[in-house]
Amino acid sequence: MGRIKTQLIKRVTEQLLSKYPGQFSEDFSENKLLVSKHVSVFSAKLRNTVAGYLTRLVKVRKAKGV
């Protein structure tokens, strides 16, 4: 089973996807840099969690064809 994501992670990720729809890709490293650029995150762990969840959502949406 996977890790449970908090509402904060989900909310920030959805806001980033709606605000910057075409910027994020399936590459975690690129998304990590973009998250740190667009959001002021206090810890690297939080930034990485948001970037990882963002990467996962982009892959799922691409697979669905959305």
Image (cartoon, rainbow, N blue to C red):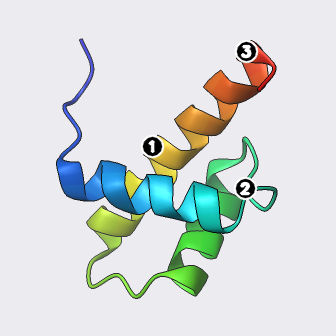
Q: Which mark is residue 5?
A: none
Identify which residue is drawn at 66% across, 37% down: 58
Q: Is residue 42 left or right of residue 6?
A: right
Q: Are marks 1 and 3 in contact (CB under 8 Å)?
A: no
Q: Is the residue under label 2 in contact with that under label 3 (CB below 8 Å)?
A: no
Residue 27 to residue 17: above or below: above
Give, as a three-letter code, the residue at label 1. Answer: Tyr
Q: Residue at x 55, y 34 (%)?
A: 56
Q: CA distance from mark 2 to mark 1?
A: 12 Å
Apparent side of residue 51 relative to residue 33 in the rendered image (left or right) = left
* Residue at mark 2: 24
- Image height check: is 10 above or below 15? above
- Where's residue 52, x and y in %? 47, 46
Residue beneath the point at 56% across and 35% down: 57
* Image coordinates for residue 3, horizontal then vertical, percent: 22, 29
Badge 2, how many Cα within 10 Å: few under 14, some, many 20+? Answer: some
Where's residue 62, x and y in %? 77, 26
Quarter of the image where the C terminus is located: top right
Q: Quadrant of residue 65?
A: top right
> Which one is nearer the viewer's eye here, 35 or 28?
35
Task: Classify mark 2: helix, strand or loop.
Answer: loop
Q: In the rendered structure, which amino acid carries the disc numbered 2?
A: Phe
Mark 3 or 2, nearer chain start: 2
Q: Which residue is mark 3?
A: 64
